Image (cartoon, helix red, strand yellow):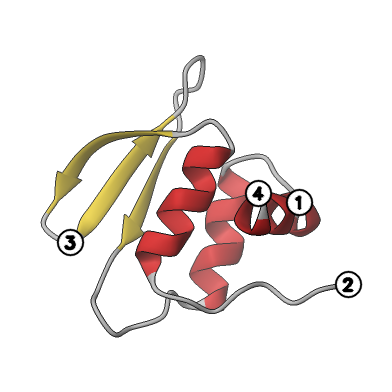
Amino acid sequence: MQKLPRVCGDKHVAAFKRAGWKLNHVEGSHYILVKDGSDIHLSIPVHRGKDLGVGLLKKLIAMAGMTNEEYIDFFYG
C-alpha cells in the first residue's frame, strides 16, 4: 500500500476536484469544497510552504467517503 502524499494543500484541493468536488468559496486560507448531492463540505487549509498534516488528510478522505487507495488514485491520476 502506498503512503498518502505529504504536500501542500493546493495539491490536495486539485485531487479532490478530480474526485468530483467543486470549490465553493475561500475563507482566508481555507478552500471550501462541496459536492453535488452531499450536505458535507471539506475545508482544506492552503498555506504556502506547509504540507497538509496526514491526520487532517485522513479525516478529509473519510469525510469525502473515499478510501486512502481511492484518494491516491485521484491524487496521481
Secondary structure, mark 3, is: loop
Query: Horizontally, is 47 left or right of 77 in the view?
Result: left
Which residue bears the numbered disc 3? 29
Residue 76 % position (x, y): 66, 59
Quadrant occupied by the N terminus:
bottom right
Disc 3 residue type (three-letter): Ser
Q: Could you tell me which residue is drawn at 43 percent across and 74 percent down?
A: 52
Q: Could you tell me which residue is drawn at 53 percent across and 51 percent down?
A: 15
- Labelled pair 3, 4 in contact (Cβ < 8 Å): no
Which residue bears the numbered disc 2? 1
Q: Could you tell me which residue is drawn at 56 percent across and 59 percent down?
A: 59
Which residue bears the numbered disc 4? 74
- Mark 1 or mark 4, whichever is nearer to me: 4
Q: Could you tell me which residue is drawn at 74 percent across and 59 percent down?
A: 68
Q: Residue furthest top?
A: 37
Q: Residue furthest front?
A: 77
